[in-house]
Image (tube, rainbow, N blue to C red):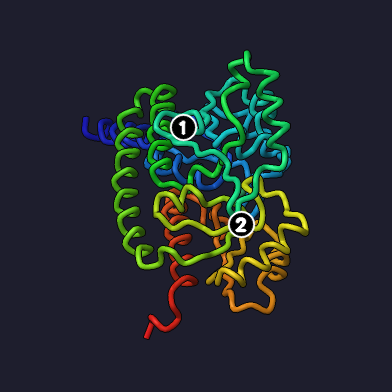
Amino acid sequence: MIRTTLPTALGLAFLLAVAPATAAPRVVADIAPVQSIAARVMAGIGAPDVLLPPGASPHGYSLRPSEARMLEAADLVVWVGPDLTPWLAGPIGALARDATVLTLEEAPGVVVLPARAGDGFEAHPHDEDDLAHEHEHADDPADAHHGPRDGHLWLDPENAVAAARAIAAALGTLDPAGAPAYAANAEAFAAETADLVRAISAELAPLRGRPYLVFHDAYQYFEHRFDLPAAGSVALHDGVSPGAARVAALRDRVRAEGFVCAFAEPQFEPKLLATIVEGSDVRTATLDPLGAALPAGPGLYPALIFGLADGLAECLADPGSAR
Ligand SMILES: [Zn+2]
C-alpha cells in the first residue's frame, strides 16, 4: 500500500508543480519595463516575453521574425499603446488576433499626460496640421480623443501600479485559477512601489530647482511624481532628432541659465549632447529610461526607477556636499 501511495503522491506533487507553469497564459510585453511589471504580477506562476531587445528605441523599430512569432503565440499582449509605438499597432492587429490586448494608455487608473510643448519643450512641429486633422474627423469618436500624448507613462510609479492591477485583471480572466495569485502579486507590487516612491522623494527633495537638460522628452511622468522638473530636452517626446536651430538655442540656454547637468541615454548617439555642452561647466551623465543596462525580470522596474533617481542625484548634487 505504502509502496504504491508514495510514488503516486510524488507523481501528483510533480504534476502540481509543473501544471501552473504550463497553464500560465503566454504573455508578451512591448518593452522591458512593462515585461518587468508583468513578471512581478506572474511571480511563481509564469514568465512573460518581451518584443523589443535591450537598447532598441521604441520610437522606431522593426520586429524580427522571432518577435512576430511571439505575437502570434500570445494569449495576452501588454503594450503601452500607440503614443509610444505607433508602428506596433499594425503587427498586433495582424498577428495577435487570438490574443487579449491590454493597452496600458487605456487601462483604469493610468494617467496619460499630453505631450509637452513650449518653455524648453518646443511645440510639436505639426500642431497646426493636427488641429485641422481633428476638425476633419471631429465626428469620429475613435479619432477625436486626443492631440499628441506622451507615451512614457511607466516612468510614473503610480502608473506602474495601475498597470500591474490591469495586468492582474487580464490574467485572472484568462486563467481564473491563478486570479488570486495575480491579484496578490499586484498588491505586493503596489506596496513595494509605495516604499520606493517614499525613498526616492526623500532622496531628490534637496535637489529641487537645479536646472538640467535631458536627452529626449521622456521624463515628465517622473518629474511630476517627484517634483523635479527638467529645464529642457534635446529631442522631443517622439525621439526625433532636433534641428540645428534647437541645438544652437540649447547651447545658449545651458550657459545663460546655469544648467548643472545634461543627461545622455543609451538609445541615442551622445554626439549632439557633447555639441551642446562643449566648452561649458555643465556635467554630463546618463539616464536609462528603458532599463537597457539592467537584467530583465521583476527586479528591472524598481532598479530602473532607482537608477534614474541615483543618476539625477549624483549629477545634480553640489560637488562640495559630499565632504
Ligand atoms: Zn522615448
Residue 163 or 52: which is nearer the viewer?
A: 163
Q: Residues within 10 Å of mark 2 (few under 14, many from 20)?
A: many
Quadrant location of the N terminus in the rendered image: top left
Question: For the residue marked with disc 1, what is the amino acid?
Answer: Thr
Q: Residue furthest bottom?
A: 323
Q: Position of residue 210 (x, y in %)?
A: 46, 67
* Residue 180 image-quadrant placement: top left
Read off the residue under disc 2: 233
Read off the residue under disc 1: 22
> Residue 23 vs residue 197: left or right?
right
Q: Residue furthest front?
A: 256
> Residue 64 vs residue 142: left or right?
right
Q: Residues within 10 Å of mark 1 (few under 14, many from 20)?
A: few
Q: Which residue is painted at 39% across and 32% down in the image?
A: 109
From the viewer's perspective, is residue 316 above or below residue 73?
below
Please, what secondary structure does the residue beneath circle 2 have? strand
* First-in-chain label (2 vs 1): 1
Residue 311 or 5: which is nearer the viewer?
A: 311
From the viewer's perspective, is residue 198 above or below residue 163?
below
From the viewer's perspective, is residue 100 above or below residue 228?
above
